[in-house]
């Protein structure tokens, strides 16, 4: 299950970012995950719960945005969304497409935090 190592890296990155916001609490971490990235969303969610225990991210929510596969079709001159991962053919003209524009991403999109006000 490589999702655990992926989520561990995400948690480490978020904790590193939190250093600039002392006392802040993470509410939500949003990921952009391409359909071809070879990860399973349920596994990411499960691993996130485990990896955030006893960290500043404990109790936060993981939101996974699955991005469709987008290819560039040379004959059409357009970027097209591929409906099926079984056939890399342009849905407009039926020609084979091979120029991947989107679909392999695996990145932190954003982090939502609650800043804690310091009392003086």
Image: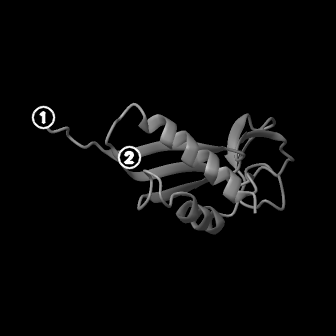
Which residue sits at x=80%, y=35%? 74
Q: Look at the image and tell me in which quarter the C terminus lies.
A: top left
- In percent of width and height, residue 27 lies at 37, 53
Which residue sits at x=47%, y=58%? 54
Whether residue 16 sits left or right of residue 47 in the image: it is left
**Residue named by callout 1:** 120
Which residue is the extreme one toward the top?
20
Which residue is the extreme one toward the left?
120
Residue 68 visible? The answer is no
- In percent of width and height, residue 16 lies at 51, 36
In 3D space, how far apart are the residues under numbered discs 1 and 2 (Cα atoms)?
A: 25 Å
Which residue sits at x=51%, y=57%? 52
Can you tell which mark lies on residue 6?
none
Up/down of 23 relative to 82, above or below: above
**Residue named by callout 2:** 112
The one nearer the camera, 40 or 118, is: 118
């Amino acid at each position: 299950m490589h999702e655990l190592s992926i989520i561990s890296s995400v948690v480490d990155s978020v904790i590193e970012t939190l250093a600039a916001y002392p006392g802040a609490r993470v509410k939500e971490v949003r990921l952009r995950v391409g359909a071809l990235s070879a990860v399973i969303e349920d596994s990411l969610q499960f691993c996130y719960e485990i990896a955030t225990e006893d960290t500043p991210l404990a109790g936060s929510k993981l939101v996974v945005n699955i991005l469709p596969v987008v290819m560039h079709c040379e004959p059409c001159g357009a970027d097209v969304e591929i409906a099926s991962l079984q056939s890399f053919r342009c849905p407009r003209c039926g020609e084979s497409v091979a120029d991947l524009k989107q679909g392999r991403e695996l990145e932190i999109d954003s982090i939502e935090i609650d800043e804690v006000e310091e009392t003086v």
